[in-house]
Amino acid sequence: RHLSSAEIRNRFLAHFEARGHTVVPSASLLLDDPNLLFVNAGMVPFKPYFLGQETPPFQRATSVQKCVRTLDIEEVGKTTRHGTFFQMNGNFSFGDYFKEGAIQFAWELITNAQADGGFGFDPDKIWVTVLPEDAEARDAWKRIAGLPDDRIQPRGLKDNYWNMGVPGPGGPCSEIYIDRGPEFGPDGGPEADEDRFLEIWNLVFMQEELSAVRAKDDFDIAGPLPSKNIDTGMGLERVAYLLQDKHNMYEIDTIFPVIEKAMELSGKKYGASGADAHVDDVRFRVVADHVRSSLMLIGDGVTPGNEGRGYVLRRLLRRAVRNMRLLGYQDPALPELLPVSRDKMGESYPELVSGWDRIAQIAFAEEEAFRKTLQAGTQIFDLAAGDVKRSGATTIAGDKAFALHDTYGFPIDLTLEMAAEAGLSVDEPGFRQLMAEQRERAKADARAKKGHHADTGVYRDILDAHGPTEWLAYETLETESK
Ligand code: ATP
Ligand code: MG
Ligand code: MG
Ligand code: MG
């Protein structure tokens, strides 16, 4: 039987509640953490407990946490499993149970029959990974789950040491994968193919504090945490895609209705055959994903802007609109698409329904502004692209990209995307140089006017952590290591 997203969520929480966990509601995506733009994992709201900065009111907790990962934006629609917004089911132990308990609880939930409240996955299709030196976890998987050695795959730090991507708690982890079958790729476990073998759950043995994180597998350990903890994260949408017999997370009950609406509007068919079908399918998925993320971000209080969180939202909204145009739909799209997403997500997040007027106003106004930008700038872009092509070159000059930005409000990633679609590249260093010069001029002006340093205000933290935030959404693409 297919389980709906709501059922998966409820079963998860009930499973852990029955095992002594306190059910904690999702925190906002905008928790105050100087290092993070958005909550990107279920453990973030519990960070002070892990670090020993606060005493938890419970030793065991469970939640379904809203998450946004801008790092994954380029993967959306291309892999089967990455959304910019997703929900992470989690169970947490603060100095209570450790590896054995976590493995026991996880194994029961995924393999118990659906009639008994479990997810009913076939134990023979389950693979797990552990750090090569983590004999304790390996032994626990053998004893508790009876997994054969060849389905307990050793993987290095990049996959089997979890950290927040920024300083904070971390630890070795053990991931759970489901084999989707030979039609989806070669045999050989998750190490061989992460499309056929789908990662659904990560059990983190949270035991260290990290003082610096340069990459997933390159970090400094400051020392042990005050206690040994458990932090797990299961992707709700990934489990839904398996249990609803779909091929990717964009086809599940809470997301696909947006694709259906986009089909109706564009007159194109998702999943069609033909030369451009794949390209169009990615566009449909990007639309559905970005519409949902935008909805959730505005719901939590983000408004479009040129920096930090606001810029991420702006980029998501604009990409959704642009992809609808690429699918052939020219009219305002968000008034059609956003309500469909609200109807689905509103079941779990009633604040989307009660706050709808505000959300709609913000989103629709941004689309209107973007339509004006496109109207003004597209012609200029096309002229520039035409000139480049006629001259036999392939690169749009930095000053052209700068003019598009400065005069027509074209963000650089829009110029980059449109250039790529036209088979051209952009002289980005040249563009950046001009931007830096402009910034310097503005600073000097401000100093001259006010007689003191220009105030970068509330975005100071974000700037410190990520550099000039105008680049944030784009630069994160470049640092993604996969
Ligand atoms: P992947 O390797 O597939 O990118 P991850 O190892 O980065 O996933 P974790 O940080 O371990 O993911 O997060 C815990 C769980 O959250 C994952 O096992 C997965 O089920 C889910 N998850 C992670 N990123 C996404 C995403 N972008 N969209 C949907 N679910 C996700
Ligand atoms: Mg990832
Ligand atoms: Mg992974
Ligand atoms: Mg993982």
Image: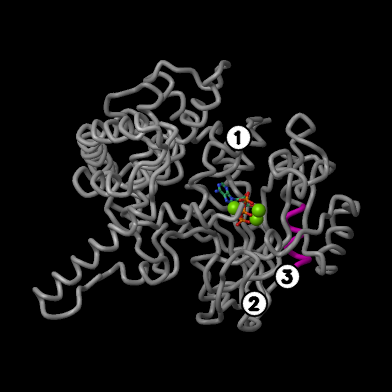
Between marks 2 and 3 in the image, the one whose residue lies nearer the viewer: 2
Q: Distance between the residues labelled 2 and 1?
A: 34 Å
Q: Which residue is drawn at 19% across and 66% down?
A: 441
Q: Which of 258 and 244 is in front in this view?
A: 258
| Residue carrying label 1 | 248
Q: What element carries label 2?
A: strand
- Residue 355 in the image: above or below residue 390: below
Q: What residue type is labelled 3?
A: Phe
Magenta residue span? 99-107
Checking the image for residue 208, the label placed there is: 2
Q: Which of marks 2 and 1 is nearer the N terminus?
A: 2
Q: How far apart are marks 2 and 3 (CA)?
A: 14 Å
Q: What residue type is labelled 1?
A: Asn
| Residue carrying label 3 | 98
- Majority secondary structure of the magenta segment? helix
Q: Earlier in the sequence, mark 3 or mark 1?
A: 3
Q: Which of marks 2 and 3 is nearer the N terminus?
A: 3
The colour scheme of the drawn protein is one colour
Q: Is mark 3 on a helix, strand or loop?
A: loop
Q: How many labels does the image show?
A: 3
- Residue 171 in the image: above or below residue 178: below
Q: What element carries label 1?
A: loop
Q: Where is residue 221 in the image (x, y as percent from the top left)?
A: 63, 79
Q: Verify whether residue 102 appears in magenta.
A: yes
Task: Tell me: 406 left or right of 236.
Answer: left
Q: Position of residue 347 (x, y in %)?
A: 44, 40
